[in-house]
Amino acid sequence: MILPELFHDWFARQGWQPHPHQLALLAAQGDSLLIAPTGGGKTLAGFLPSLVELAPVAGSDGYLENRESRKGLHTLYVSPLKALTADIARNLGRPVAELGLGIRVEDRTGDTGQTQRRRQRVDPPEILLTTPESLALMLSYPEAPAIFGGLRRVVLDELHALAESKRGDQLMLGLARLRALSPGLRVTGLSATVEDPQALAGFMAGAGPVEIVEADPGPDPDIAMLPTARPAPWSGGGGHYAVPEVLAAVKSARTTIIFINTRAQAELFFQALWAANDENLPIGLHHGSLAREQRARVEAAMAAGELRAVVATGSLDLGIDWGAVDLVIQVGAPKNVKRLVQRIGRANHRYNAPSKARIVPANRFEQIECVAALEAVRAHDLDGEPRGPGPLDVLCQHMLLTACAAPFDADALYAEVVTAGPYRGLARVDFDACLDFAATGGYALRAYDRWQRLMLRGGLWQLRDPRAAKLLRMNVGTIVEAEMLKVRLRGRGGAPLGEVEEAFAAGLTPGDSFLIGGRVVRMDALREMVVEVTPDPSRQPNIAVYSGVKLAMSTQLAHRVLALIGDPAHHAALPPDTRDWLGLQAEVSRLPEPGLLLSESFPHAGLWHFALYGFAGRNALQTLGLLLTREMEQEGLGPLGFISTDYALLVWSLDKVADPAPLLDAERLRAGLGDWLGENAVMKRTFRNVAIVAGLIQRNMPGLRKSGRQATFSSDILYDTLRKYDPDHLMLRVTAQEAGRGLVDFGRIEEMLARSPRREHRLLDRVSPLAAPLLLEMGRVPIRGEGRERLARIEAEALMREAGLEGIG
């Protein structure tokens, strides 16, 4: 495809030259994957073939429009964020208007009004911008063949982010359906941060190959630690010690994005910034639990250059184009090199300008992690975990939604599904198990009408009751979050402020205060799943607890941290106080290093403590803590509790661990894992999520929505029933796979043991320097067992001795 003169003229008027990768993408003959840096024009590159095809055609009397040839939906754009679709709509409107293309560009997300949605089903625009969930919903309507039958191109933005979750699996199943509805469809994937382009290309591939186009990466970023007058504290995650320096950096820049890993910490840091903001600089707050209206106001203010800074979580990670942003500050360790690179790219959103970023570690361990992450960025060493096969709960939902659109042939659907990248290796037996579940609920549930959803008639599978389509569509999606309650100002028409978790709201009584959207509010009432509040800035707030609070450090970054700690010659890269801390550790005990699994036992506060420096990530070490304390209980050591971080595990007990080797035997731990998981709340929580995605449990019902407690109660009953009567049920199989891969992360425990053939246990007379921060960490897990009972007896006997009652009883 050749770039028409019309476009050359437009580029010239902008003072631009088309990037080589934009022209390469224009010339691609089939599906393609573009790897380009932030600001490298990758979004325009993705749309350029569509704009050229939709442009007026040249005739003898000049440019003539041929509307008949481009009637209907031509290009579908899919992104992971609704905010990103709004940004693309705004930025795409400019070339469409200036080139005089006369085409419609519309979005279709959860925020789109019902009237526009209905119209789009019969009169779609030429370019439609949407999300994976909205695409799945559109494909579930009988009109899907008419809507997508003439589709020519699909653009998948920020593909790396989609590929990391079930949303990507759902999207690839939708893409397989689109390819079946519109043969000859061309797909373009866009991404800025990819550790394995070939794997990502395979993820998005259909039947044919994917051409990978890699752009010039541009200049390396200007990235460093933010110097602070006060040293980082021993523990904690807030970074409040650096507020003066962060505010000074904001003053020296035009516009700054301050990224923080969690929503609760973002609220707290925003409040701390405002307390120190003597010059009243305009600073906003943006995270996923704020009201849509408030997020939209912040996004519009940023686009207009009206804010000097915005405190944000991952809600602003991806490619929103705010050219005025010239500084990014990451507060807290990024936990993932790709995440850090993505966030850095928000600054100087231009192809030939280096992004400027500063990092503020929240504590001493994070100082080491941040130095390791900086070195990884400079070495262009991105992290990433290998993807497993496409999850079966997502496939079950896809089957039910496919039946909503029209009856389907099982053989044809199987042939279609295995063209999707994640499902290329799907065995027919697993496909049939999903179909049986979608049709009957499985062996133990087939006697119940509510799970009899599909029936076979004339060789085709169809909905048993067509009215079920509405319920299935109401529960589209793969994101299962904690139940959130709306927060509104009290009074008729009270303005929405955002959301809080149901569990947090349940603990509030009228008069309690909490922080949301940077404001202190007082709870007045809870009515119809809405928390009504009144502003009360004079109060000391409680803090809303949001879901997804703690991110786990990636395996690759953990390896870098361990290598840095274990090499004293490398410590010169660390701040002086951290160097001294590690030096003292080497004197008192020894330093962890690659190939060595270091552990320590020491007395503290009347108890024995066991520290294990595993560097395996928070989820894995928390699981190890649960398994290890079970083994300690069996050995009679009286474990009382534990705390885990990304770096280490600390267990306290009545008796010391003299030899940890038997406790850390991989086979023994794996056997204990199976016993522990059966009754554990982790499995029940995982089952609940799987059951919601697969359609076994519906959260949304016509006219009402199940609360989180109701959904949990329903899923717990189903879990116990299936374990008893149908232990091989598909949902239990999927649950075990999910728990082992995600929440439990046992694979990383095995990786930790395998990469550490040398073991060393130190018996110390006091707390070691590396263990000291662990004693200050929050999130302790108590162990209810024989040790707790022994401790109670010891304390009771001590009290009786003090009272002179020893021997009386």
Image (spheres, helix red, strand yellow):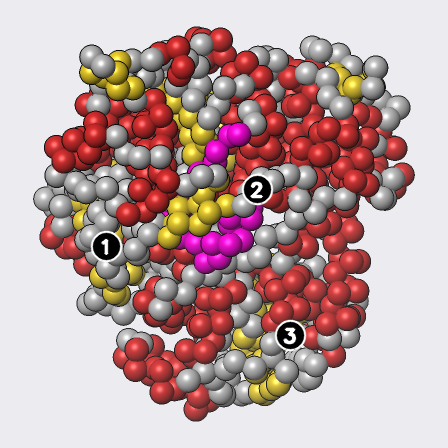
Question: How far across and down, in percent of the image, does residue 193 sit?
Answer: 40, 52
Q: Which residue matches tag 3?
A: 753
Residue 462 x/y as whole percent: 75, 17
Mark 2–mark 1 Cα distance, whole angstroms, equals 36 Å
Q: Is residue 249 magenta?
A: no
Report the span colored magenta.
184-203
Question: Which residue is the site of mark 2?
Answer: 208
Residue to which mark 1 is pinned:
355
Q: Amino acid at mark 3?
A: Leu
* Disc nearer the start of the sequence (3/2): 2
Which structural element holds mark 3?
helix
Q: Tell which tag, 1 or 3, sits nearer the viewer.
A: 1
On screen, residue 655 above or below 96:
below
Q: Is 470 on the left-hand or right-hand side of 100? A: right
Cα distance, mark 1 to mark 3? Answer: 39 Å
73 to the left or right of 218: right
- Comes first in the chain, label 2 or label 1: 2
Q: Report the residue that reaches farthest toward the front.
A: 60
Q: Is residue 575 visible?
A: yes
- Residue 289 location, quadrant: top left
Q: Are marks 3 and 2 in contact (CB under 8 Å)?
A: no
Q: Nearer the viewer, residue 76 or 377?
A: 76
* Three-letter amino acid code at the position of disc 1: Ser
User: Residue 65 in the image: x percent, y percent?
Assistant: 29, 13
**Residue at horizontal 26 percent and vertical 45 percent from the top:** 19
Q: Quadrant of the N terminus?
A: top left
Q: Position of residue 262 (x, y in %)?
A: 41, 48
Residue depicted at 33% across the width and 13% down the height: 66
Q: Earlier in the sequence, mark 1 or mark 3?
A: 1
